[in-house]
Amino acid sequence: MNSDIRTKFIYDSILYYADKIIGTANIESENIYITKLADKISTTFDRRKVPDDEFNFEEGENLYSIFNILNRKDPSEIQSKRYDASILYEDEKIKFAKDSVTKPSGEFYRKIKKIISGKLENAKVDMDFINSFLEMLEQTMSYIPVSGVKDEKIDISVYEHIKQSIAIGSSLFEYLTENERSQEQEKIYSNPEEFYKEKSILLYSMDFSGIQSFIYGQYGKEDVLKNLRSRSFYLEILMENVIDELLNELNLSRANLLYAGGGHAYFILANTKSTKELLATFDVDIKAWMQDIFGVDLYIGSGYGECSCNDLQNKPEGAYSNCFREVSSEVSKNKLRRYGASQIKALNRGKKADGERECKICHSSYNLNSEGVCSLCDGFAQLSRSILNREIFTVVSDKSKGILPIYKNGYLSAEDIKRKDGDEYLKTNKKILIRAYSKNGIYKGSDYVKAIYVGDYHNADTLENLVKDSIGIKRLGVLRGDIDNLGKAFVGGFEKNKQTLSKSAAFSRKLTQFFKYDINNILKNPVYKIPFSNSGDENIDRKIAIIYSGGDDVFVVGAWKDIIEFSIDLYKNLKEYTQGTLTVSAGLGIYMPKYPISYMAEKTGELEDCSKKLEDKNAITLFDKNNSYHWDEFIDNVMGEKFAVISEFFSTVEDKGKSLLYNLLELFRNRGKKINLARMAYTLARMEPNSNASEEEKNLYQNFKEKLYNWMLDENDTKQAITAIYIYSYLIRKEEEK
C-alpha cells in the first residue's frame, strides 16, 4: 500500500477526533466509515453502555481508576475511586485515585482545548505531526473519561480510546484496502457482526532476552555505577528506537504500540500478507544486527497471533487470553530457534579478536582500544559523563558524531543538548538526524521529539560515595524487586465480561508511569524512617541511585539503611497506587562496595526468588534466605515492634554494650536447645537495673525483659527478633568492626 495513503488516513482520523473535542469544522474523508467502525469497535472494547456508538466529548466527569476492578474476584471488593482532573507530567506528584474528588473546572477544559487548537495550527500530513499530536493528547486527555451513560463508572480515558481507535482503524484500513474491500466499509459499519469474526488483526510482540546479564554482568571496578546507568539507559533508547524503526517500516504511528516496558512490547497491526512479510524481514534483520553488535549477549524474540475483533472483546469467553497465549507461544518458539545456519556460521567465525587482551570491563576481546577497553564499554563510559543531566538524546547517521550503535543504521549521540536549545540543534543537524528523544520532560519546539520517561534518581556518582557518610556500617544495599503475577493480571486480571484490550492497556500504562516516572518522586520525597534514636540530623535525601526501573521491576543501590527505608516507601506507594490489587516481591542484600556488581545482582535475585516462594508472594527477603517476610509483617512486627523495643532499650541504657546484644542474638539463633531458654532468663536477670536506677529505666528494662522472653517462646517471634537485631547491629557497628 502507498505509505502516503495510509498516512493520510491516520491524519484524517486525528482530525475526526479533534473535531469532536474542540468543535472545528466537520472532517469528512472517503474512508470515514472505517474511522467510525474503529471508533465503534473501540467503544465495545471500553465496555461502555452508551446509546450512541459514536465518540462524543463530554465535560464535567472524573475518571474512575482501572484498579477499582483489577483482580477483584469478589464483587464486594470493587471500589469506586477516581482521579482529580490534571495534565499528565505537569508536576511530579503521584496521581493517586481517591474516594472524594473535585469535578473538573471550566477553566481546565478551556486550557486543554487551547493546547489542542494551538497544535492544529501547525498540522501537517506526516507521521511526525501525528505522533506529536498523540503525545499531546496523552498529556491533556489521560485523566478525562470517555462519555458514558449516567452513573456509569468509566475507567477508560479519552486518550486511551482515541489511541486504541487509531490503532484499530489503521489496521482495518490496511486489511480492507489490501483485500480490495474498502468500498464495503459503509456496509460493514452498518452491520459489523460478521466482520467482527474475521481475523483482521495481528497481535505482535517482541521480547528482549539477556537484559539482566547485559546490565549487571560486567566486572570492571572503575566507575561501576556510571557504567551500570549507561548500560541501562542505552537499552531504554535501543528499545525505543527499535520500536520506532518497526513503526516507520510499517508506516504506522505510535498509536499501534499497545505496550512497552521491561524489555517487552506489544503492537496492534493489520493481518495482511504485506505486514507479515515485513515482520519476517524485520525479524531477520534485527537478529543479524544484534548478533553483529552484541554476539549472544542480547537477543530479541518476536511472534504474532491472528485475532478477530471479537477475540479482542473476549467473545467467546477466553478468546482474549488465548490471543496472548498464542503470541507468547510464538515468541517462545522464536527464542528456541534463535539462529539460522548462516547466523550460526557467523557466530562460529566470530569477530576479529585480540588474542592477548580482554576488555577490562566486560572481558570481551573485540575492538579494544589502547586503554584495553572495547568499543561498547568505551561508548558507555562516554555516555555516562553527562547522562544524568542531559535532556535530549539523538540518534544520528554519522558515526563520527555518535558513540554507540543503535539499530538500524544509527548512532547514539553524546552531545549535550538542552530542551531550550533544541530547535537550533535539530535544524543545524537535520541531514544526519534520524530521531530525537526528550528525557523526563516535554519538548515544546517545532520539531517532533519523542518524550521518554526513566527512573534516574541518584545521590552520588560512585558506589563508594553512596555509603561514604551513611549511618552505621559502610555497606552497600542492593534491592531487586518486581510485580507479582503481572502476566496473569495483564491477560486475566478482570472479570471475563470486562477483559478487553482497553482494560489491559489502561492498567499497564499506569504501571509503566509508576516505575518510570513516579519512582523518582518517591525517592525525592522519603517518608519512612527506621525508628533509630541515634540517627541524628541526617540528610533527608536518600543515598540511592536507580540502576534500572522498567515496566514492572526495579533495581536500586545505595546506603543499606536508605535502601531498607526506600523499599518500604516503594511497597506503600505501590499499594496505594494500585489500590492493593498488585503486589511486589523483593530481595535486599548488603555488600562491600568493591564486590562485583554481577555478584550482587545474582545474590539479590536469589533473595527475590525466596520472596516469590512465600504463599501469596508480596514479600521481602533481607540479607539471606532465612529472613523472608510478607511486607506488613516486616513493617509492623520486625521494625514496628521488635526493632523498636531493641533500639529503645540499647539506645537508652548506656552501660549495655554490643557484646550483650550479640549474646542475645546467639541465644535466639539456638532457641531449639532447651537450655537456651534458661540462659535467656539468666542473661535478662543479670541486666536488671540496680535500686538507684530511675523509674523510667526500670520500666524500660521490665518491658524489654518480658518482650524478649516471650519472643523466645515463639518460633516466628524469634525469627523476627533475629532480623531486628541484625538491623540494629548494622546501625551501631563501626567500619573497623568485623
Image (cartoon, grey):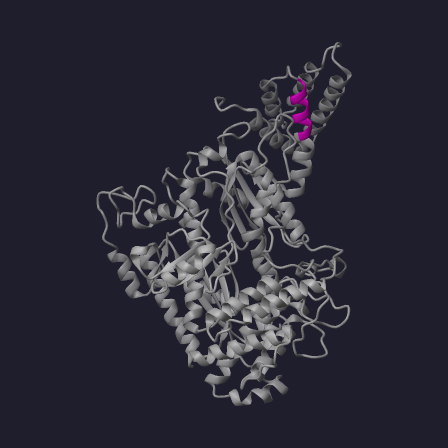
Residue drawn at 41 percent across, 48 percent down: 230
Q: Quadrant of residue 66?
A: bottom right
Q: In the rendered view, would you say 561 is above or below 317?
A: above
- Magenta segment: 644-653
Q: Is residue 211 visible?
A: no
Query: Residue 193: x and y, percent?
Result: 62, 83
Q: Quadrant of residue 488?
A: bottom right
Query: Residue 148: x and y, percent?
Result: 72, 72
Left or right of residue 528, residue 121 in this image: left
Looking at the magenta stretch, what is its main secondary structure? helix
Magenta includes 647?
yes
Marker count (numbered): 0
Q: Is residue 703 visible?
A: yes
Front in this rendered view, residue 403 or 27: 27
Residue drawn at 58 percent across, 51 percent down: 518
Front in this rendered view, residue 19 or 653: 19
Query: Residue 366: x and y, percent?
Result: 27, 50
Quarter of the figure that contains the N terminus? bottom left
Q: In the rendered view, would you say 594 is above or below 700?
A: below
Residue drawn at 40 percent across, 40 percent down: 224
Magenta includes 358?
no
Query: Residue 346: x and y, percent?
Result: 27, 60
